[in-house]
Image (cartoon, rainbow, N blue to C red):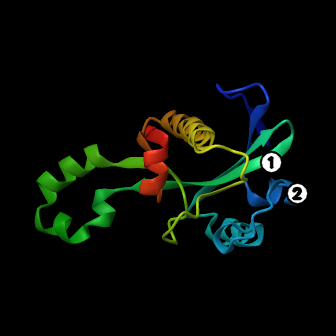
Amino acid sequence: MTAVPLRRGALLQSLHFESADQIPAAMWPCRRTFLDLDYLRTLDETLASQMDMRYAVLTRAGRAVAGAVFQRVDFDPEIAFPSIQKQSSTWFSTIARRMRVSGVLCGNVFATGPHGYWTRDDLSTAELFDWLAQTLEHFRSQLARSGRKTLGVIKDLSLDTAEALSN
């Protein structure tokens, strides 16, 4: 577990974990199927060689108020579009080398819907997404040190949530 300071408020602290096994059950009360600790442990065990998972818990005065799942996703156009590569190998390979990107996704690539984070009622939407953005940037910047082009995405952000953030 790593504690990361936040820009917003001294009572808020972000705790980062490299596996679901490291998260104390009392800190992760969410029982929704795709955010349940047992499900996340299963993902960790079965996909360890193909996917790099990270977890974060936001605490306020020592009490968990939010949690989030982050997945590293690599995109290589030569692997994603093999038929195009076979037809136009020279120009496609040149472009594809420039388009290889690694990303950090807050969410679950295996499920549609807002399955990337949970929150308690006493956390505002602005606080939640400020924390998610800071945590996403933290994980993305770690990945960027490898020299690859990187991006960060919060998956399944609803229009209602986006409108609340803009007000």
Label number found at residue 26: 2
Residue at (78% x, 41% y) in the render: 59
Figure quadrant of residue 16? top right
Q: Quadrant of the N terminus?
A: top right
In the image, what residue type sits under mark 2?
Ala
Of 68 and 66, which appears nearest the observer?
66
Figure quadrant of residue 123? top right
Of 160 and 30, which appears nearest the observer?
160
Check whether the beta carbons of the residues at disc 1 and disc 2 lie within 8 A of each other.
yes
Per the image, the residue denoted by label 1 is 64
Horizontal and vertical percent position of residue 165? 48, 41
Cα separation, mark 1 vs mark 2, equals 8 Å
Residue 118, above or below 40: above
Q: Can residue 153 be seen in this snapshot?
A: no
Q: Can residue 70 be seen in this snapshot?
A: yes
Of 34 and 18, which appears nearest the observer?
34
Are there few (<14), some (14-19), or many (20+) residues within 10 Å of tag 2? Answer: few
In the image, what residue type sits under mark 1?
Ala
